[in-house]
Structure formats: structure tokens, C-alpha cells
Image: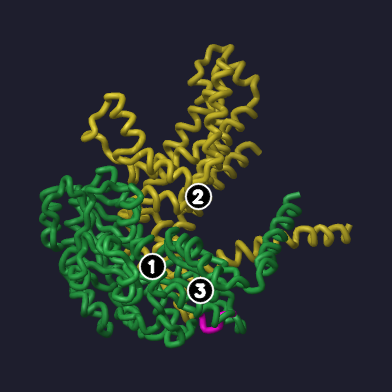
Amino acid sequence: MRFKASYNLWLIAPAALMVAVFFLYPLYFSLYSAITLDNGSFTLTHLEKAFELYSNDILFTIMLVCVSVFILAILSITIAATIALSPFKRITSLLGFLYRLPLFIPFIVTAQMMRTFLAKNGLMNNAFVEAGLLTPMETISLLGWSGIIITFVWKQMAFSTLLISGAMAALDESQIRAARNLGASKIRILFEVMLPQITPTLGVAMVLSTVTMMSVLSVPLMIGTGSPTMMSADMAFRVNSYGDYHVANALGLVSYLICAGLAWFYLRQSLKDKGAVA
Amino acid sequence: MFTKTKIAAIAALGLTQFMGVAQAETVLNVATAGGQNMVDYVKTYLAPKFEALHPDVTVNVVGTGPGDAGSHKISEKLSAQKNANRTSWDIDVAVVHQKIGGEMVNSGLLAKYRSNIKTGKMVSRDSAKNALGIDVDGYVMPMFHSQTAIAYNSDFVTNPPKSYDELVTWTQKNPKAFGYNGIKNGMSGVSFVTGWIYAYGSDANTLSSKTYNKDLHSSWNKAFEDLKAFNKNITFTPGNAGTLDMLNRGEIFMGPVWVDMFYSWKAEGKIPPSMKLSLIAPGMPGQPMYYVTPSKAAHPKLARDFIELATSPEIQAEGIVKRFNWYPGIDANYVKSELDTATWEKLFAEITPEDLSQYGKSFPIAPYFDDIKEGYERNVSN
């Protein structure tokens, strides 16, 4: 038995080493660099500078991510619920295929696509003009904060719908049938039977989407206009333009904290749920 | 299963390293910063010409990415090899931006080679001796000079602004018709902001060559305030190419661009012929790219030969001026004789040599440059 335990430890050693070397060490190093001077003494100047120069951008990032996640949740739930509850199986299987497509398209490709689609004289507006809905002078460019939200939602929707729709499919079918037999409408089944049971999955989908959105650089660079911009673009700018890793890492620390805050809320929620069950 | 695939992939990657050696006896490693057009130039134009002259040499071209970030990567790689006390470094020739070129000379990464190549004495530009306040005489050969200017659509703008003052008035009359990319999305915007500080903060001479005075930037507050007000009347674009895109689509009628990019796009038909250029007073900055060779390059002689070829009047005329619409790195008089008048005149069709010498400024020395960018972040964008 003892032999086996140590044998098992050896088995996880390579993976543990990978995590330590490629994840924990860089994480520690960037946190350390965010709060120390070059000589290693503790300082808050980098954080102060990060807030002094980028407080607008930090707020902008939080707003954008919140709005995107909100829209994302509504859309993914709608699609997943349609697939789960609709009686038209052919149409829903087509929908099931369509919503998965963005899953295979990288962010940078999505950004480039949106750039030509959302521009003032881009594909979307040209289509409206051709259809006689708008005149060329009435078109507006969606490149900017709205474009970033559209891109995030478009790209993340596949991922979160996949998770949510999976969770809905795993629900006990008999509950839904029972609710139906008792005369519940589809909306009511969704809100009172399905959603309460998939909240943890919804939480996971939203937290993971938030973390992804916080880390994407190509979208704010390609679709945003730089003023204000997202924190990831500021970090890149700090490194590329000033060679200043300290303030970039301080911004990184702020974004860790935002994500950590979310993770904390989520973990607390899911622990509570489990506690209530036990 | 995955591990196996990974091992196979890594092994395959490792093999490719040897394959280069197997093909030819010598591999000359050339790393180039800058956009795709730079990599294309070195890879598809220079490298084959060099390989034709040296049949036993293969040129391995690596692009490290656009902007100062690309140059930064080269500098970081070399200093890592220096700190590891390697006897020979794996980059033979590098193409870097002005600012990082200066920094690399300061940190002892580069060889002083210009007096050892024939084309070394054909250089006349100031930027071959001075890189944003750092003495680089002998360490660098300018590959080309690039300049920023204001592009405008002559169908709509008949009387283009000649100075920053006129531009401000123009944007007040034509709100949202002028566009630039801020300072985080490419150098044409940075250049526009730098020109703004030259106009309303401190003049270009003070900022480009004098010693650093750390209190000077506090006198620019008014300039930044005005810029913030100016920004309300303009459209922000998503990058250097973004400005040209929006000009092309008629979403803006005016904006700062790189001259070489402008000419290339025009030649490819990506922007209409009605687009024109104007270099406004008191001037906008431009910058050279430098050919450098590390102090411990594996093939120093070949590296010098490569740079000598790249800076020869024929190559500068055919490659730099004719194909890529850059201003030559070596003295223009050596290049002019290699070209027909039509090509030569095309290069100066919209910005005359007089305008260029009068309003073509260099970027400020590094600490002032950082002050300008941080001042913008502090006072304008936040």
C-alpha cells in the first residue's frame, strides 16, 4: 500500500512540475513584480500609477465584461432552452449545429471578421443600405465598445450555450414532463424547473467567459479604438511601449483580483448550495 | 496519447532545426522587426539576392513582429544570450527600430561595423549617428527612412491644412471627419501626438537632441488639455491600417499615416487616387530602421556582406525606393542616379524634398518620448 502511494506520487510529479514551473512560478513572479521595486523592496507605486493612468480603462473593462456576460447569459439560455423545449426537432438540430460554429473560430479571426462587418461602410450597414432600410449618411460605425461587446458575445455564446445546453439535457426528463402534465407553460418550466437546477453550470460558463474576455488582447486592439480601451491592451502597451513590466503586472494584479472576486462569489454560492443539500 | 503526440511534435520541431543545417553549410540568421511588408522585403527580395551571390549560404529570415515590441524581442533574446555568456549568438543580422537600436548599443549588444563595409561612407542622415539622443555612430546602417504625414481625400478637402493650427480649425468646422488611432494602436497616432507636443509643448530641437530635463513635461499641461478638447471633434481609428481603411471607406476624410504605407496601398489600389498627403507645420516625426549586427554574431563577415549588399545603391534604389516606396537609408544622391526620373518623382510627388527637410522631424529622445506618451495617458485618455 505504502509502495503504491509513493508510486502514485511519482506519477503526478511530471504534471505537478509542469504546473509549478509554467504556471505557479510565472504567477508568483508577476505578482511579486507588481508590488516591488527593481531592488526588491515593497512598493505600491506601480499600483498607484496603474490607477492614475488607467482607472478609466479598468472601469471600462469591468463595464464591458459585465454587459457582455449579461447579454451572453440571456442569449445562451434562450438558445439552450429553445433546443431543449422545442417540439420541432429538425429545426433545433440545425440550431444546435449553427450555434457551435463560433467555437472553432479563434478570437483574432472573429475580430477581423467583425472589423469588416461592423464598420460604418462595412458589410452590415451596406446590406441595410442596399435593402433600403438606411441611407449611407445614417449608418453608424459599431467599431468601439459596442463592437467589442458584440464580438465577445458572438464568440463566447457557443461555449456557454454548449455548457448550458448540456446541463439542460442532463436534467431528469420526468420533472419536465410532470410540470407539463400539470399544465405549466414552457416559460414557467424554464424558470421554475430548469434554471434553478442548472445555476451552477450557468455560473461556471459565466465565470470562465469572464476570465476569457478579460484576457483577450486581439479584440480590443482590432475593434476598440484605444481610448478608452481594455486592460489587456494597456498591459501590452505598457510592455511594448515603455518596457515597463512593473505597471503591466500591477494591472495584471488588478485583473487577477477582479477574476478572483468573481471566483470567490461563485465558489461561495456553490458551497452554499452543496451545504443546503447535505 | 496526448503526451505521445506532443513528444512527436516537439521532436519534429527539433528536427527542423537540423534540416536548415543539412541543406547548406552555413545559415545566416536574419531577424527583422516591423510589419509584414518588412519581413516580405527581407525574405522575398534581399535573401534570394544574397543567396545568389553566396551559393553555400542559406538565409533564415525571422519576423519578430511590428512596432517597438518586435525590436524589443530581438534585444531581449540577445541580452539573454549575453547574460548566459554564450560565445556566439544565434542572430547574425537584425533589423530594428531607432529607439531599441540605441538601447542595444548602450547595453553593448552590437558590433561597430560601419567603417568595415563599403557603403558605410554613403550615409549622410543624422539618424545614422544619433538615435534619439544615443550615440550610435558606427553601429548602425539606416535601412530606410519612414515619415508620417497627414493623408486627406482631395475630393472633399480642397484646401488641406498646412499646420496644426489650421488642422484644429478644420476639425472644428468638420467634426468627426479627422481620424487618428490614439497612442496605443500604432505609431502613426503616436507620431501625430508627438507632432502636437512639438507644436504646442516644446519644439522638436529641444526634445530630439538636448539633454533630458525631467521638469519640462509639466509645461505641456495646456497642450494636453487642448488635445483633449481636439479629441472631442475627431474619430478614433483602430490602427495604422485602420486609419487608411477608414479613409478608403470614406468614413473619415483626413488622418495621420505612414508615407510608405500610404504609397504602397495607393499602388495596390487599396485607397483611391484622390488621396493626397500633406506634411504640416511645425512638423511630424519619422524614423529609420537600422541594420545592425550583434557583437558576437556567429558569422560576422557574412553579416557585414549582407548589410553591404542591402545598403548598396542598386538595392536601395530597386528595393527600398521603387518597390516599397520608402525613403532611402543611404544618401539620396547615390540612389537617384540608379533610378529613372519618373520613379524618383513619384517618391516626392506629394511631399517635396523641401517640405521633408523642413518638417520631417525625428522622434524625441527616449525619456521625453515616454513623458509624452504618459502625459497623454494621464491627461488626455484618463
Residue placed under numbered mark 3 in the picture: B76
Residue A54 seen by the camera: no
* Mark nearer the viewer, 1 or 2: 1
Earlier residue among tags 1 and 2: 2
Q: Position of residue B68 (x, y in %)?
A: 41, 68
Name the residue located 52 percent from the left edge and 38 percent from the top edge.
Answer: A102
Q: Secondary structure at mark 1?
A: helix
Q: Which residue is mark 1?
A: A241
How far, Cα to Cα, is label 3 from label 2?
29 Å
Please count the marks in the image: 3
Type of amino acid under label 2 = Val
- Disc 2 secondary structure class: helix
Q: Amino acid at mark 3?
A: Glu
Is residue B31 something that shows in the picture?
A: yes
Seen in the picture, residue A235 relative to B108 is either above or below; the reply is above
Q: What kind of residue is marked 1? A: Ser
Residue A99 magenta-highlighted: no
Asked if marks 3 and 2 touch (Cβ < 8 Å), the reply is no
Give coordinates of residue A226: x percent, y percent: 33, 55
Query: How many angstroms separate mark 1 from mark 2 (CA)?
Result: 25 Å
Pointers 1 and 3 within a single chain? no
Question: Which mark is on residue B241?
Answer: none
Labels 1 and 2 within one chain: yes
Chain corresponding to green in the figure: B
Q: Colour of chain A?
A: yellow
Tell which of B292 and A4 is nearer to you: B292
Pinpoint residue B283: horizontal percent, then vertical percent. Answer: 20, 68
